[in-house]
Amino acid sequence: MAVNAGSSSIKFQLLDMPSETQITSGIVERIGSDNALFTIKFKGEKHVVETPIKDHGVGVSLILEGLIKHDVIKDINEIEGVGHRVVQGGEVFKDSVLINDQVLQQIIDLGEMAPLHNPANATGIKAFKAVLPNVPQVAVFDTTFHQTMTKDAYLYGTPYEWYTNYGIRKYGFHGTSHQYVSEKANQLMGRTDTKVVVCHIGNGASLSAVQNGHCVETSMGFTPLEGFPMGTRSGSIDPAITAYMSNKLNVSAQEITDVLNKKSGYLGISGLSNDARDIESAILAGNERAKLAFDIQAKQIADYIGSYYVYMGGLDAICFTAGIGENSPVLRQMIIDRLAVLGVKLDVELNKLRGERLISSVESKVKVFIIPTDEEVMIARDTMRISQD
Ligand code: ADP
């Protein structure tokens, strides 16, 4: 079972391994409220129940009872491993890991750097451990794939002691997705000595540069705020703006950081929505700020790709993934148009299609792919590998 626990939700998928077939998926939402929701999808049917869910423990019990009630499994012992997505693994975790009390404590301690995510991930782990005490639980981190970056890429130009004493460096996120997609790109190209850029563009968005299967650069940093504008995040800005705006608006630095995380990006620039579909419709209706939201993002993404081209000394493939990367021909075209100098060119007709495919034109010097991501499969693969070690 692949689990992604948030502060008030638990998303899950049950997969048959090693065939990697998805058996069922679902979500418990609004944990802590009297009208929480439990949704489970099985054999093409979707079942939704509204019920009070006091805490994550009750949510996990509901999921396991639901699996039996809907005949997904006959007995909870059929679940042979649980893999948990954990956002921040710091420099401690260079690989996924079997969870014991010490590992759980380290995940909680790393919550200092990821206060919105790690505590919630840890709560999910505890809830599953309580109900399935004899089943191996594995932590799969968003950060481990990026641990192969070298110091020139992961250190900032800040005092070195900030790194040694406080862990200030670039960690990167969405690692399971970047790994899944870059491995798939190598399979599609039939070799592993490659230079690949993965564009994971969803509500949260990041890029990675992957050379010979190893991550060498990524756009997110110490937190997921760094990089280019996303649904509600600003991406990188002049750091002096935080103190300046905190003064102007007479609010704390934390409140400015909240605006940069939650009210910027598509939402802040357009003033309309954080959803790419709304931005696209507004562009079609002639809304200039919506157009600007896509333009600013496309410009910055192209800048990153250009710098990765230089850093890796070339480029074999650009891969688009996640909600927007997989589904927005408009944004893909806007990005690739800005990369014409690299000899990259889309096939306009292929770019209109969906699903895993090559979308570059025959004369393009760099291949462009759409590769739907599958973070749950990565979690399930690691859970199987680690629990069998
Ligand atoms: P996250 O996992 O970060 O929440 P997703 O990867 O699910 O995000 O991506 C969500 C984004 O994908 C939303 O902005 C949504 O508008 C966009 N999206 C989904 N389908 C389409 C589509 N058909 N066209 C354009 N954008 C889409």
Image (cartoon, rainbow, N blue to C red):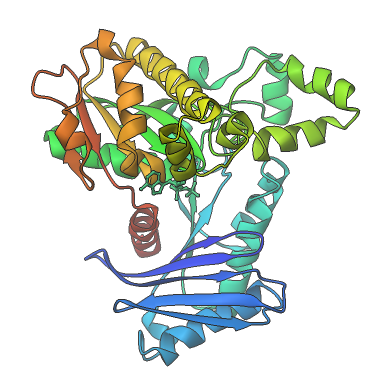
Looking at the rendered image, the quarter that the N terminus falls into is bottom left
The quadrant holding residue 67 is bottom left
The quadrant holding residue 145 is top left
User: In the rendered image of this protein, does residue 328 appear above or below residue 18?
Assistant: above
Drawn side of residue 99 relative to residue 166, left or right: left
Numbered label tally: 0
User: In the rendered image of this protein, does residue 120 appear above or below residue 112?
Assistant: below
Drawn side of residue 66 relative to residue 248, left or right: left
What residue do we see at 37% from left, 31% from top? 331
What residue do we see at 39% from left, 52% from top? 375
The spot of residue 74 in percent (x, y) is 36, 91
The spot of residue 170 in percent (x, y) is 57, 27
Nearer-the-camera pick, 354 or 225:
354
User: In the rendered image of this protein, does residue 169 appear above or below residue 82?
Assistant: above
Q: Does the rendering let one see residue 145?
A: no
> What is the residue that sits farthest to the left in this orientation?
362
Looking at the rendered image, the quarter that the C terminus falls into is bottom left
User: In the rendered image of this protein, does residue 112 appear above or below residue 213?
Assistant: below
The spot of residue 10 in percent (x, y) is 56, 66
Q: Does the rendering let one see residue 43?
A: yes
